[in-house]
Amino acid sequence: MNIKKNRGVLFQDNVYEHHIIRKKFIIIVLLAVTIVAFFWAINAGAMPIKPKKVILAILGLGDNKSISIIRNIRMPRVVSGILAGAGLSIAGCIMQNNLKNPLASPSTLGISNAAAFGANVAIILLGAGTIVSTGLGEIQIFNPYIVTICAMSFSIGSTLLIISLSKIGRFSTQSIILAGVALSSLFSAGTMIIQYFSGDTTKVAAVIFWTFGDLGRASWNEIIIMGILIAISIIYFIYHRWDYNALDSGDDTAKSLGVNVERIRLCGMFMASVITAVTVSFLGIIGFIGLICPQITKRLIGSDNRYLIPASAIMGSFILLISDTLARVLLSPQTLPVGAVTSFLGAPLFLYFLIKGM
């Protein structure tokens, strides 16, 4: 009898180790394909540059022309894609865990539209910086930090309102999503009203163009701010990975394991809002990354947050890099808004998941 029990335990241990090895292997593969996408994104453009020259330019070697193109034009765009994709994907992952709903994401909860509304308030009503449409069709906001503060304030306020509604009205998770959709419509209406009553048509046109989503908009200073905030959030989420695993089993089980459910949920939603706000304020609205990427990753790696959180971040970076590269090469030399490409790719996947059952 003891021999059979020992064999059973050994078999279970081997199965568990096999699953862990498989999860780690998938993460390594995702990381590898993201690195490939990184070099493809840097190489893609009006002037193709060989991979060897790309590496030399990144290191500051090679001819001045290649160094200038790589370091000043393509690298900021690619790094923005890596950071924004990781941030939005992990924000969606945490929201889906906290609300126990696969439809939860920064866009479906109205957080993206709230951040965009805050940015419109700062740009049009508060005059936070001057917006200029250059001869190249670029939009420059000379003081983006006030825009970020406003976007962050409205997105966090929207999140707190959703959480408050869920407590006061004892909403179900489905009702919370519907509340997010309602808030999204409200902020969209507010944005349209601000733009309608603005007397500066050039500024309105610039703001509309800004909301499309463009990875080439952020400078290195903005990328550093994004990188710091997103890195802090990811470290926080990974540190609390066991708490999120406990939440998957239900609030009562999590509380019995010593998890402060309310604090973990509130802090998680807050950090996800910060990620969304800083991304939207610097890059514009980029849809479907926070909704689709965690779902794809969960199907590959399972729901164990020890591996799901970092894998979702890598998946988000990969998909956004691919989307932005396609946006630049499909109609070259014209560049499509990356938000349009992610929505175009994400919508069929979303419908597929609905048909299969999310």
Image (cartoon, rainbow, N blue to C red):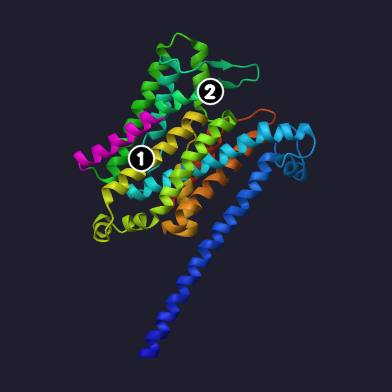
Picture coordinates of residue 145 (x, y %)?
47, 26
- Vertical placement of 289 versus 10: above or below? above
Instruction: Report how many numbered discs are placed on residues in the image.
Output: 2
Sequence order check, earlier mark of 1 and 2: 2
Q: Nearer the viewer, residue 264 or 347?
A: 264
Q: Which labelled disc corresponds to residue 270? A: 1
Identify the secondary structure beneath mark 1: helix
Tell me: 168 left or right of 175. Answer: left
Picture coordinates of residue 316 (x, y %)?
52, 45
Picture coordinates of residue 165 (x, y %)?
24, 37
Q: Nearer the viewer, residue 293 or 157?
A: 157
> Residue at point 31% right, 47% down?
265
Residue 140 seen in this snapshot: yes
Q: Magenta span has 163?
A: yes
State yes or no: discs 1 and 2 in contact (Cβ < 8 Å): no
Tell me: 163 left or right of 273. Answer: left
> Residue at point 48% right, 71% down?
17
Mark 1–mark 2 distance (CA, rounded to whole Å): 28 Å
Magenta region, mostly helix, strand or loop?
helix
Q: Which labelled disc corresponds to residue 209? A: 2
Q: Which labelled disc corresponds to residue 131? A: none
Picture coordinates of residue 42 (x, y %)?
68, 39
> Residue at point 70% right, 29% down?
333
Task: Give, as a single range, the part of the protein colored magenta.
Answer: 152-170
Q: Nearer the viewer, residue 277 or 258?
A: 258
Tell me: 20 left or right of 171. Answer: right
> Residue at point 47% right, 58% down?
307
Amino acid on which disc 2 is placed: Phe
Amino acid on which disc 1 is placed: Phe
Residue 330 seen in this snapshot: no
